[in-house]
Amino acid sequence: MKPGAELRNWLDVLQASGRLALAEPEVALEFGLAGVANRLDGTRATLFPRPGGHPVPVVSGLLSQRSWMAEAAGVPEGELVAQFQRACREPVPCRRVEDAPCQEVVHRDVDLAELLPLPTHNEHDHGAYITAGLLITRHRGRQNVSIHRLQVSGAARLGALLLPRHTLAFFREHEESGEDLAVAVVIGVDPLTLMASQAIVPLGQDELEISGALRGEPLPVVRCLDSDILVPAHAEIVLEGRLLAGVREPEGPFGEFPQYYGERAARHVIELSAVTHRREPLYHTIVGGGREHLLLGCIPREGSFLSELRRTFPCVTAVHLPLGGTCRYHLYVQVDRPAPGEVKNVILAALAVHYDIKHVTVVDTDVDLHDPAEVEWAVATRFQADRDLVVVPGTQGSRLDPSTADGVGAKMGVDATVPHGAKPGRFTRIGVPGQDALDIGALTRHAPPDWLGAARR
């Protein structure tokens, strides 16, 4: 079994390697929990016993490093994106079961605040939010899995921000006929299913099958009580309900991945009919704007972007969504000996893969995509704005980007590759022969107090 194929197994892995912190009992649900999680962000996941006095423990920070994601998938870090690409290309159908841990306890009288430990993360958030819930919908026999911010608006009511993605496409078809859309919100899934939920794949491809491919075996799923939706059988908690046709209610503000607040506006509404869970469940929360929030969408998107670009441009060798660009807005692309003019085509194609991408920077294979200083160096020494800049105004972007006009703004591409026709040697990087092969430990030692005398001996 892959280390990240089960949530509780993954917590065991983190604990055994010193990466799981145990908070003091009864940390406050309002700001306290998020504050502790943020202080440990990127170093340790956190387990919160009796948060705010609630009997259900909370976990956060499950995937706060790229290396952790690779470890969960059972591959070296350098192979993670390729592994995700293969999973998207070769999904594994789920395995249906009749009895599932996620349905051991059933609640028909839904009161979210009583049943779940609901944190409020950032200062101006409009109360408690469910932030790590997989929203699963089903339409004409096809499922979609994604994560949306869900405001707790009442005992059995959620406000949902639905951006122009597949969930909204499913719902629109139902709403046009005056019908609600059945949904399930799944909280506390394994890391591989979390990652799979963020894949950029064609409408109707079930991301749970990508999870199966990542784990190397079918994901066990069970039918919901009130709909035909199939949910991960070993999840901790499942909320069942309906997206209400023709209903919009105020939602927000909420601290989002750009590390600004998404504004308050009329949003979609979910009405819940049932909550099911394990006998002693765990509640997973993702703190808005933290590394887990950013990285969760990073690797799956990189795999999807690389697949899309390589389909048309064999010169593309790698892509990277850097933390500084919120793992959403900035894309670095590496190319190997592109044809004249091809880099600009790569830029235009990359901007079209997903509306979130705002700036694309293309570099050669001698530049390390994962080192922002290397990419900046390439821009500083190989880019000229009048020759290498691509600007596309009036495009669809992210509505969560505060610099746009309700999601409409400009996109930019930077060609930071060596110009075609450059004189030989003009762009040759300096380097010391044999430097990387030196055994520095054998050739150096700590300088003694009499360093000057040592230098003369």
Image (cartoon, grey):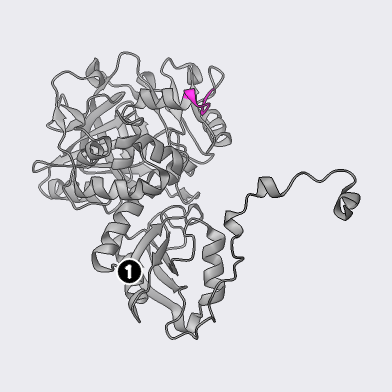
Q: Is residue 4 visible?
A: yes
Where in the figure is residue 370, as x and y percent of width and height? 48, 55
**In the image, residue 214 above or below residue 97:** below
Question: In percent of the image, x 38 and y 68: which residue is there?
Answer: 335
Where in the figure is residue 288, as x and y percent of width and height? 46, 41
Q: Which quarter of the figure has residue 358?
A: bottom left
Where in the figure is residue 190, as x and y percent of width and height? 33, 31
Q: Which residues are magenta?
A: 15-22
Amino acid tagged 1: Cys
Q: How many marks?
A: 1
Observer-nearest of 179 and 79: 79
Quadrant where the N terminus is found in the figure? top left
For mark 1, give the secondary structure: loop
**In the image, residue 205 above or below residue 413:** above
**In the image, residue 227 above or below residue 424:** above
Observer-nearest of 277 and 63: 63
Q: Which residue is mark 1?
A: 315
Where in the figure is residue 272, as x and y percent of width and height? 25, 29
